[in-house]
Image (spheres, rainbow, N blue to C red):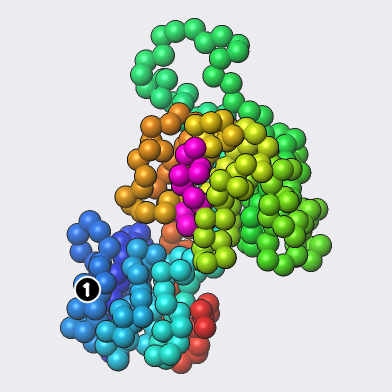
């Protein structure tokens, strides 16, 4: 008999097909991912061996405790895992996994797109065209800021941060970065390390966030940090909304301290702060940085690979503990 799986999140068609082919799978129905209660109910009734989900499922200690003993592995189709209480899963003996690596290039593509779109006022231009245009724009009007040759500051030089730096070098940008530890030269690829986040900021024309969420990074981009940036800098966040003090970012966008921002993630999702939607100097997207067909398939396949490996007794490919 095939292993029993609860597929708790909406997934690409090919991922669902593979899950049905390789597992006795209960698949989410409707237009939204399963809630915690629905996952627990499905896992109990299906006597599930595994659950597969995304960052829309808060797998807290309480939720883990309420899962049936049959569940041996939980695989999130995401790199981030701040929605999982890893310590609680470890204490219970339930393996939890994520999907690092497979979404690096796609997310870096998206981050650099957001940087370009924010710098060159893409949202504002699109808004003008959809309203009909029909008027002259002088050479001094609606100007963006140049990207080529500027300095990009990166918070967190992990896989995606390094891929972002690689793209920046294609635009002749200088790269500075702050991370908990300095990387070896072969990974820095010429990027300059700053041991202090705040000391890095005055050098930045652009600031791109690629750090995990957690107590050390919660609201790390606050009023004090934004005040240390060059006036007219551009902020990009495709990482986690928790890194940003949104009130401070809104104030900086209105005052001109920030020329613009490209934001894919928010402190409250999907119910994000609608004050951002009122501004012409911010481009917004719905946490979709890894949203290409190829990447979402690869993420789903990697999660299924992790589940299959654990249930076969081989150990997880991407264990979180």
Residue 140 appears in which quarter of the rendering?
Answer: top right
Q: Which residues are magenta?
A: 239-251
256 relative to 3, above or below: above
Whole-percent x and y of residue 219?
52, 55
In the image shown, does 92 or 106 lie closer to the viewer? 92
Q: Find residue 34 and report its horizontal and vertical position in percent.
A: 25, 67
How many neighbours does mark 1 have within 10 angstroms: few (below 14), some (14-19), or many (20 or more)? Answer: few
Residue 28: name its quadrant.
Answer: bottom left
Residue shown at 49% from the left, 50% from the top: 245
Kindly state the secondary structure of the residue where label 1 is placed: helix
Q: Position of residue 194 (x, y in %)?
A: 75, 56
Q: Examine the rendered structure and indicate whether residue 1 appears above or below residue 239.
A: below
Q: Judge left or right: residue 114 versus residue 127.
A: right
Quarter occupied by the N terminus: bottom left
Q: Residue at x 37, y 87 (%)?
A: 72
Q: Residue at x 52, y 67 (%)?
A: 215
How far across and down, in percent of the image, does residue 281 sit?
49, 31
Q: Which residue is mark 1?
A: 37
User: How many numbered markers are drawn?
Assistant: 1
Residue 169 visible, this orientation:
no
What residue sits 62% from the left and 32% below the top?
232
Would residue 248 be counted in the magenta stretch? Answer: yes
Q: Is residue 151 visible?
A: yes
Q: Decide if residue 73 is on the left or right side of residue 191.
A: left
| Most common secondary structure along the magenta stretch | helix
Position of residue 185 in the picture relative to residue 251 (left or right): right
Does the magenta run of residues contain 193?
no
């Amino acid at each position: 008999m095939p292993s029993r799986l609860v597929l708790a999140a909406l997934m690409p068609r090919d991922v669902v097909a593979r899950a049905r082919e390789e597992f006795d799978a209960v698949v989410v129905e409707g237009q939204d991912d399963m809630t915690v209660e629905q996952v627990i109910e499905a896992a109990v009734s299906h006597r599930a061996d595994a659950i597969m989900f995304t960052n829309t499922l808060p797998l807290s200690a309480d939720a883990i405790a309420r899962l049936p003993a049959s569940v041996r592995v939980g695989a999130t189709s995401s790199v981030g895992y701040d929605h999982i209480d890893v310590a609680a899963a470890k204490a219970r003996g339930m393996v939890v996994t994520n999907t690092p690596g497979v979404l690096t290039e796609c997310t870096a593509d998206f981050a650099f797109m957001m940087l370009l779109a924010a710098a060159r006022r893409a949202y504002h231009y699109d808004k003008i065209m959809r309203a009909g245009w029909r008027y002259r724009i002088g050479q001094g009007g609606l100007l963006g800021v140049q990207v080529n040759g500027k300095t990009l500051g990166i918070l967190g030089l992990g896989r995606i941060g390094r891929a972002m730096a690689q793209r920046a070098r294609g635009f002749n940008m200088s790269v500075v970065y702050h991370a908990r530890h300095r990387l070896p030269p072969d990974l820095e690829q010429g990027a300059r390390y700053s041991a202090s986040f705040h000391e890095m900021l005055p050098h930045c024309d652009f600031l791109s966030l690629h750090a995990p969420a957690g107590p050390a990074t919660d609201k790390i981009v606050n009023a004090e940090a934004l005040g240390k940036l060059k006036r007219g800098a551009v902020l990009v966040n495709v990482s986690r909304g928790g890194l940003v003090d949104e009130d401070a970012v809104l104030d900086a966008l209105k005052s001109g301290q920030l020329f613009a921002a490209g934001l894919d993630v928010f402190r409250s999702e999907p119910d994000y702060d609608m004050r951002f939607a009122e501004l012409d100097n911010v481009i917004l997207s719905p946490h979709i940085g890894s949203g290409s067909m190829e990447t979402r398939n690869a993420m789903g396949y990697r999660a299924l690979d992790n589940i299959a490996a654990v249930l076969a007794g081989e150990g997880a490919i991407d264990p979180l503990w």
